[in-house]
Amino acid sequence: MVAARNTIDRGDLITADDLTTTQISGDNALKIVPGETLDELVGKRAALDISAGGLLTPEMTTEDNMPPAGKSIVGISLTPAQVPAITPRNGDKVRVVATTGEGGELASGAPLATSAEVIGASTDEVSGNTVVNVLVPYADAAVLADRASTGNVALVVDPLER
């Protein structure tokens, strides 16, 4: 069977180094990817987070590109005051909310919040900021990127289902 040698984040391109094969006594009810098909997974993308040591099922990989059609990825660097104390995880539903700048005024003419999905997050070791990559509708990307560049945004993590 095919197993993840390393943790593979959702959206990551799968490499041969990410995968290994293992022997398990099977259960025909489980749809686990057979070891002889490992090479077919290289070059696909992870459709969801795959933990190191986890056995792969066919639903865990995709040939779809990231971002998908009609969507864009926007990176946002957030100070500890702009993000919840828990690191956002891939798949989290969030809102990127406009905040007041130094003048205490909100930018006009644009929505106060942009709904998004987290597709990656990490901590910048130098600045201590949390860098969050979010998937947003293509039409919202430019406004969000502009706001993010000013630092006048905050991240709100919402329930997966509202």
Image (cartoon, grey):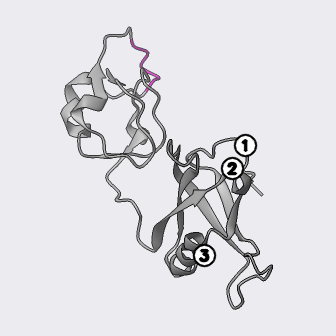
Q: What's the magenta bit mostly, secondary-structure-wise?
A: loop
Residue identified by numbered label 3:
147
CA distance separating discs 3 and 1:
22 Å
Quarter of the figure that contains the N terminus: top left
Up the image or down, 58 lies above or below 91; here it is above
- Please tell me whether mark 1 sits on a helix, a strand or a loop: loop
Which amino acid lies under the numbered mark 2 shown in the image of this protein?
Pro
Q: Which residues are magenta?
A: 26-30
Q: Position of residue 37 (x, y in %)?
A: 22, 31
Residue identified by numbered label 1:
85
Magenta includes 28? Answer: yes
Q: How many neighbours does mark 1 have within 10 angstroms: few (below 14), some (14-19), or many (20 or more)? A: few
Up the image or down, 100 lies above or below 48; here it is below
- Please tell me whether mark 3 sits on a helix, a strand or a loop: helix
Q: Are marks 1 and 2 in contact (CB under 8 Å)?
A: yes
Quarter of the figure that contains the C terminus: bottom right
What's the residue at 47%, 23% (across, down)? 29
Q: How many neighbours does mark 3 have within 10 angstroms: few (below 14), some (14-19), or many (20 or more)? A: some
Q: How many neighbours does mark 2 have within 10 angstroms: few (below 14), some (14-19), or many (20 or more)? A: few
Q: Position of residue 144 (x, y in %)?
A: 58, 74
Left or right of 155: which side holds 141? left
Magenta includes 93? Answer: no
